Amino acid sequence: MFKVYGDYRSGNCYKVKLMLHLLGKEYQWIAIDILKGETQSEAFLAKNPNGKIPVLELEDGTCLWESNAILNYLADGSEFLPSEPRLRTQVLQWQFFEQYSHEPYVAVARFIQLYQGMPEARLEEHARCLKLGYKALKVMEKQLERTSYLVGEQYSIADIALYAYTHVAGEGGFSLEDFPAVRAWIERVASHPRHVTMLG
């Protein structure tokens, strides 16, 4: 059985949880408290020397880390990862977009607001995250005005990667009022019969 080391409120960890549910895979969840420094323990660093969650531990003890890499591993050979090279590359394109243009702003704004309670020292950073996060949401809106999912008409790990923090963007101070295509996409993703919520 897989072991997942993570925090239920983390979007990056939620990606792995959602993927496992969509695939019907059994797993054991091992809660890690990042605010208590548990990712920096000797035992955890032996699993991920970068000291971050999530970590997926395979049955043979091998540990995989970086949420989008884990998604690619789990989805390989399934309906959630296209085999056609162009489509598969477009999935990767959106995953790179998520890590470089979306997560650093949408997720960080959420961390500052939800986890840290908007400390004075980070208010300026939070404002910058909102500005750049909205830019990323506009990119998604343009795509989702044309297609039902981020890569055509098929639900893929590109959607899982970006759904994780987009659907809770409000917890970081974002409003999705001006993004009707994004809101409709969120509803489509959540309507999958094997969908599980972040805290569910």
Image (cartoon, rainbow, N blue to C red):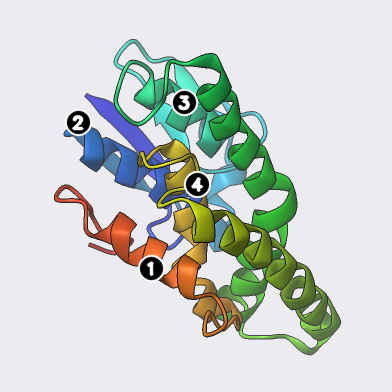
Which of 87/121 is in front? 87
Mark 1 vs 4, N-terminal side: 4
Residue 200 % position (x, y)? 22, 62
Q: Which is nearer the N-term, disc 3 or disc 1? A: 3
- Residue 33 seen in the figure: no
Which of label 4 and label 2 is nearer to you?
A: 4
Q: Which residue is mark 1?
A: 184
Q: From the image, which quarter does the N terminus lie in?
A: top left
Residue ID for mark 2: 25
Residue 92 left/right relative to 121: left
- Answer with mark 4 or mark 3, whichever residue precedes in sequence: 3
Work out how far the residue at label 1 is from the one at label 4, CA to CA, in angstroms: 12 Å
Which residue is the site of mark 4? 150
Q: Secondary structure at mark 1?
A: helix
Return the x and y of residue 78 as percentages of the image width and height: 30, 22
Task: Identify which amino acid the numbered label 4 is placed on.
Answer: Leu
Q: Of the residues tagged 3 and 1, which is closer to the observer?
A: 1
For the residues labelled 2 and 1, the Cα–Cα distance comes to: 27 Å
Question: Looking at the image, is 70 positioned above or below residue 106?
Answer: above
Spot occupied by residue 44 in the image (x, y as percentages of width and height): 52, 35
Separation of residues labelled 3 and 1 (CA atoms): 25 Å
Q: Which residue is mark 3?
A: 72
Work out how far the residue at label 4 is from the one at label 3, CA to CA, in angstroms.
16 Å
SS assignment at label 3 = helix
Q: Nearer the viewer, residue 27 or 187?
A: 187
